[in-house]
Image (cartoon, rainbow, N blue to C red):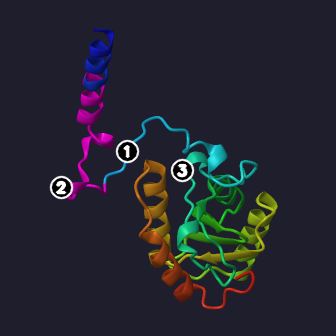
């Protein structure tokens, strides 16, 4: 009798195991085997996981964007990410009286500064203003070697849109190719301080 009960329990247990669905209840025979499990509350978006945790050059913390997968090349320096440097932009806005508003994007050792000048209908930035901005950027972020400054309205608009999307947590992957094209057009000689 014990052997018979043991056989029934084993049979019942195997039946339950056999009736168990595959992961996520997805049957690969149905052509639906391309789903991935979603994990809520995972800790991969913390600052510690977004590049160098010691990096606080005024960037947007967990909203920093990394584009390492795309290996975008910014100015021949093999930069793989863009980051908005709000602290640097605030210093430019406060310390350079000719600048009404600015955005600073950094990519490894390059900084790209989009400025809106006060009382200036031109999109040209004179060398004196460029030098002031370059000095502020390099003092604030010692990793920056090259600073490129432009008041081009297209560049300013694109960086403004990018900053807003980063701030809101919107996807920004499509911007990287556009930025590279814009940088090539606005800064064709990206080999030093513009």
Q: Tell me which corner region of the image, top left, top right, bottom left or bottom right, holds residue 141.
A: bottom right
Magenta part of the chain? 12-34
Quick one: 25 or 68, which is closer to the camera? 25
Do the residues under discs 1 and 2 have CB atoms within 8 angstroms? no
The residue tagged 2 is 30
Relative depth, front residue between 70 and 93 = 70
Which quadrant of the rendered structure holds the C terminus? Answer: bottom right
User: As displayed, is residue 22 above or below residue 120?
Assistant: above
Disc 1 or 3, which lies upstream in sequence? 1
Query: What is the distance, in whole Å, between disc 2 and disc 3 at their CAs?
Result: 38 Å
Q: Give the CA distance from mark 1 to mark 2.
A: 17 Å
Question: How many other residues sit within 10 Å of disc 2, few (<14), some (14-19) or many (≥20)?
Answer: few
Count of marks, rendered view: 3
Earlier-in-chain disc, 2 versus 3: 2
Residue 149: percent from left, percent from top: 64, 76
**Residue furthest top in the image:** 1
- Residue 37 circle label: 1
Q: What element carries label 2?
A: helix
- Badge 3, how many Cα within 10 Å: few under 14, some, many 20+? some
Q: Residue 63 carries which label?
A: 3
| Predominant SS along the magenta part | helix
At x 47%, y 34%, the residue is 41
Left or right relative to 6: residue 171: right
Judge whether residue 31 is colored magenta.
yes
**CA distance separating discs 1 and 3:** 24 Å
């Amino acid at each position: 009798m014990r052997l018979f009960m043991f056989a029934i329990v084993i049979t019942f247990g195997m039946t339950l195991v056999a009736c168990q669905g595959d992961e996520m209840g997805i049957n690969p025979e149905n052509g639906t085997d391309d789903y991935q499990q979603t994990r809520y509350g995972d800790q991969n978006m913390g600052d510690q996981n977004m590049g160098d945790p010691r990096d606080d050059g005024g960037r947007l913390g967990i909203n920093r964007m990394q584009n390492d997968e795309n290996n975008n090349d910014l100015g021949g320096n093999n930069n793989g990410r863009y980051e908005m440097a709000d602290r640097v932009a605030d210093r430019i806005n406060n310390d350079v009286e000719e600048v009404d508003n600015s955005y600073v994007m950094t990519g490894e050792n390059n900084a790209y500064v989009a400025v809106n000048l006060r009382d200036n209908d031109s999109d040209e930035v004179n060398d004196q203003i460029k030098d002031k901005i370059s000095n502020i950027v390099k003092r604030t972020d010692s990793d920056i070697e090259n600073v490129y400054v432009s008041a081009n309205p297209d560049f300013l608009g694109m960086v403004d849109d990018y900053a807003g999307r980063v701030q809101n947590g919107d996807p920004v992957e499509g911007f990287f190719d556009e930025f590279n094209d814009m940088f090539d057009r606005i800064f064709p000689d990206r080999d030093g301080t513009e």
